[in-house]
């Protein structure tokens, strides 16, 4: 693992309460001409995977930790690249990585890896395994105030899909926002999206995901690499806010019981697609999207088009990330726990 006493320095942020651990100078090599190639190398490389485990697992991390290794970009058209990781491996950023991108954009501007634009809106271009992403970082003087990202075309694949659960028969929508999500109204199972019901929400989220994951509803219409239910979005419909915009609160249960503390970036885009398909969100209106811990994203439709054989929208999400600190991690060769453990 890059030497038993290798020092790994990280800069940590949170986006809407969701942690993201940035490793600016990872002590491991990731060969490849592109970030996508580097990801495939990292998946099979013991040193790269050991580094991931060390930073993600307890006692240095936890089951819901998320992070990324900074790499060179694919070419000069981007500022840098990133390899995303979580407790189960290296992800493409089609799903959970959109939250991390907000943190990365804030980090890049705050550390001056990307120069602030005098206009107060600075583009940050990042290469991820699934492609190239451009974000806009808004600043007032030296202070970062918000980040916008425009996601991939998003759409509802299916509506009113029946699912049998231990809490009774329910119906869900299937939406794509960079990954496939099942959308469940919490009221159908007698729940609401509150911290007190955290364990129950995880249980029903996992149940719905695994009930659908091997069905035709989990097939991406164009790219089978994106097939599979990435997570379940359990939501409360809170009506409209004072401006007449739809207001909802959600918790996204992804991977195998991992919980997004934020409103979820790609999940918010999937939610935008479902609400657009059902007439709840129109161009010119804003989705006010709250998380289980009370943080908030705003999302809107910037374009209507067709994608994957479906009527689709291009969502733009606005959020913010905050620096939480720096770490200097080591691995003692006599530590019997090695790279750590995961209890869930």
Image (tube, helix red, strand yellow):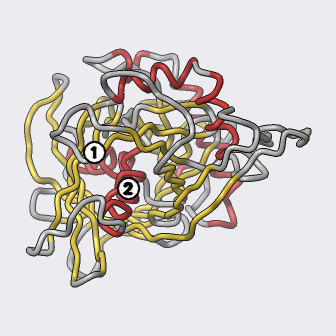
- Location of residue 56 in the rendering, given as x and y in whole percent from the top left corner: 65, 45
Q: Residue at 21% of width from left, 65% of height from top?
A: 115
Residue 327 higher or lower than 340, as above or below: below
Question: How busy is the neighbourhood of tag 2: few (under 14 within 10 Å), some, or many (20 plus)?
Answer: many
Secondary structure of the residue carrying numbered label 2:
helix
Question: Which residue is depicted at the point 52% across and 25% down?
Answer: 42
Q: Quadrant of residue 39?
A: top left
Q: Which residue is mark 1?
A: 126
Q: Which residue is mark 2?
A: 104
Q: Residues within 10 Å of mark 1 (few under 14, many from 20)?
A: many
Residue 262 vs residue 240, the one in the foreground: 262
What residue sits 76% from the left and 48% below the top?
58
Q: Where's residue 258, x and y in %?
A: 61, 45
Q: Which quadrant holds the C terminus?
A: top right
Whether residue 160 is visible here, answered yes or no, is no
Residue 329 badge: none
Q: Residue at (50%, 72%) from the top-left corner?
A: 294
Q: Quadrant of the N terminus?
A: top right
């Amino acid at each position: 693992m890059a030497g038993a006493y290798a020092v790994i320095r990280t800069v940590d942020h949170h986006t809407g309460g969701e942690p993201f651990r940035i490793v600016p100078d990872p002590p491991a090599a990731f060969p490849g001409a592109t970030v996508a190639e580097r990801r495939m190398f990292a998946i099979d490389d013991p040193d790269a995977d050991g580094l991931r485990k060390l930073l993600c697992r307890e006692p240095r991390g936890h089951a819901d930790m998320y992070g990324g290794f900074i790499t060179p970009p694919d070419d000069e058209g981007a500022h840098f690249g990133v390899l995303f990781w979580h407790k189960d491996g290296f992800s493409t950023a089609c799903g959970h990585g959109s939250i991390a991108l907000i943190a990365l954009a804030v980090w890049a501007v705050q550390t001056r890896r990307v120069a602030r634009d005098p206009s107060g809106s600075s583009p940050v271009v990042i290469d991820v395994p699934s492609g190239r992403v451009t974000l806009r970082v808004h600043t007032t003087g030296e202070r970062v105030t918000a980040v916008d990202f425009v996601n991939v075309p998003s759409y509802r694949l299916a509506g009113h899909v029946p699912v049998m659960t231990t809490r009774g028969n329910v119906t869900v929508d299937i939406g794509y926002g960079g990954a496939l999500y099942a959308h469940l109204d919490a009221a159908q199972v007698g729940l609401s999206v509150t911290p007190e019901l955290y364990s129950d929400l995880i249980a029903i989220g996992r149940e719905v995901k695994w009930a659908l994951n091997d069905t035709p509803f989990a097939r991406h219409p164009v790219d089978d690499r994106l097939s599979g239910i990435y997570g379940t979005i359990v939501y409360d419909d809170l009506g409209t806010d004072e401006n007449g915009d739809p207001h909802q609160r959600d918790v996204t249960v992804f991977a195998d019981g991992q919980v997004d503390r934020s409103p979820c970036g790609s999940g918010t885009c999937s939610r935008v697609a479902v609400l657009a398909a059902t007439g709840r969100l129109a161009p010119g209106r804003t989705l006010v999207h709250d998380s289980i811990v009370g943080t908030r994203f705003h999302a809107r439709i910037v374009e209507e088009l067709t994608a994957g054989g479906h009527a689709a929208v291009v969502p733009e999400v606005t959020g913010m990330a905050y620096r939480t600190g720096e770490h200097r991690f080591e691995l003692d060769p006599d530590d019997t726990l090695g790279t750590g453990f995961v209890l869930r």
